[in-house]
Image (cartoon, rainbow, N blue to C red):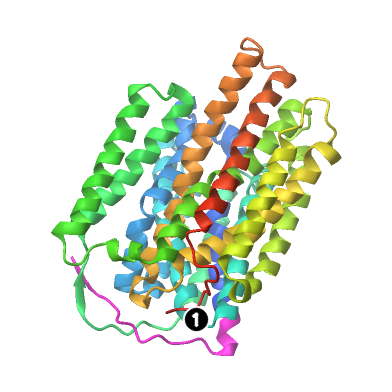
Amino acid sequence: MTSVNTAPQPARPHAAHAWMIMALACACQFMVILDSSIVNLALPSVREELGFTPTGLAWVVNGYLLTFAGFMLLGGRAADLFGPRRMLVAGLLLFSAASLVGGLATAPQVLVAARVAQGVGAAMMAPATLAVINTSFTEPNARAKMFGAWSAAGGVGGMAGAVAGGAITTGLSWRWVFLINVPIGAVLIVVAMMALARTRTGRQESLDLAGAVTGTAGLAALIYGVMQSADHGWTSVLVVGPVMAGLLLLVVFTVVEARFTTQPMMPLRLFRMRGVAVGNGMLLLFGAIPIAMWYFTSLFLQNVLGHSALQAGLGQTPAAVTFLVIARWAAPLLPRTGVRPLVLAGSACFLAGFGWLAQAHSDSGYLTGVLGPTLLIATGIGLTFPTLMATATAGVAEGDAGIVGGLANTAGQVGGSVGLAVLATVASTRAASEAGGSSSPAALATGYDLVFLIAAGLGLAIAVVSMLLPRHRATDRR
């Protein structure tokens, strides 16, 4: 399979188009992250109307997450080969069409298939948006501001998912959780066609099919095995088998890329760039931190302090707003300060915030037990996330912008998936040992507190790894 790859002669955005490109990249990121969570509160209605089994219902969520994470490397390389404009439009078309099928589904199998297709579309869109940012905004200040806006858009999507899913399901129907994507996708396709220049192509280059198959299958098997740990335990063959198969396939993928292809899907030379290697390592560690913050804090508010789901969501709103403000404010500092100061400041917030949160117990009040520390942690996320994404994708040639964007997204997704599975196991095991298997608020609090301490340790690990970067690393291209 061949395509014409760019040695692209980039078309820089005129000032009149820059805002359209920014809005397009942010809207696509918002939609991709939104759909990872918006369906959660609609699941009871979906089960009742379509007759899902409990096991099958989980795949309405897992089908999307699995293909989203598994196909991002392939989506990123495809953006390099075919151009980010084509891949973004193709991803939007697939995502919107799958949303339409999901919204009209009358059988469980159809809805699961639609969610799988949505995940593939999202995997095409996410790295393409990063490639658009990298190729359209090369001036350091403009590029840093774009990463801040892009990160904030993802944060808004994650925050809005639960609220929007509940509101749409209650006010309209669960079907509109999917159908709402169709008109939005249509608008974004038009904007993409208008705002993004066609990539002029040069040499012929083939798609690395062996690398595509082994890399995608390896990531999918690894993440599938990790997902199964929640229901079957880490020693189950249903977990160990897929995880070991995934790791083996990723080893084969690495060997194929290093020795058996002249045009690899993932050029290993990219890891000689310190920013790419270290940035992705930090993103892998960072992936569990938002999980510890948003997911386990929500559980603490509901299961320990007795708040309703709505109250828990409202209780996390100040932290979400803090993240959005800090991400937008901190991003322009990156070209002046470099990476390490912002990462170290964010890590300090993680240590202080999670350390404080780990002291919370069943008698803690919201203001001092939860609000204070979550504001600190949200500040750390706002300082760190856009900085790490900019670091992991900076300094690469435009022909590699897509695969580097896919790699950065994949590192964060894998870190989050593994982090959620490990932290959930830690929390439940600690709570069970604390109170002989009871689920009292006090016992659950000990499990969550251990999760928060582990997250503080991850913050320290990120700080240590950041020392491998130069003291001052600008985000402009080399």
Toward the viewer: 245 or 167?
245
Picture residue at 67% right of the left edge, 30% below the top: 449
Near-viewer residue (195 or 264): 264
Mark 1 nearby-residue class (10 Å; few <14, some 14–19, many ≥20) = some
Label 1, on which residue? 138
Q: For residue 236, what is the image quadrant?
A: top left
Query: Eyeballing the image, is 467 above or below 374?
Result: below
217 left or right, relative to 395: left
Q: Is residue 241 visible?
A: yes
Q: What percent of the width, then of the height, locates residue 363?
A: 83, 25
The residue at the point 78 percent across, 32 percent down is 307
Residue 215 lies in magenta, yes or no?
Answer: no
The residue lying furthest to the top in this view is 436
Q: Is residue 304 left or right of residue 292?
A: right
Amino acid at circle 1: Thr
Q: Is residue 3 magenta?
A: yes
Q: Position of residue 321 (x, y in %)?
A: 74, 56
Q: Is residue 159 above or below residue 28?
A: above
Q: Is residue 146 above or below residue 264?
A: below
Element under label 1? Answer: loop
Horizontal and vertical percent position of residue 396: 39, 73
| Image location (x, y in percent) of residue 305 | 79, 29
Tell me the quadrant of the picture where the N terminus can be found: bottom left
Magenta segment = 1-20
Q: Nearer the viewer, residue 231 or 319?
A: 319
Task: Residue at 63%, 20% (x, y): give it.
Answer: 431
Is residue 97 in view from this perspective?
Answer: no
Which image quarter: residue 31? bottom right
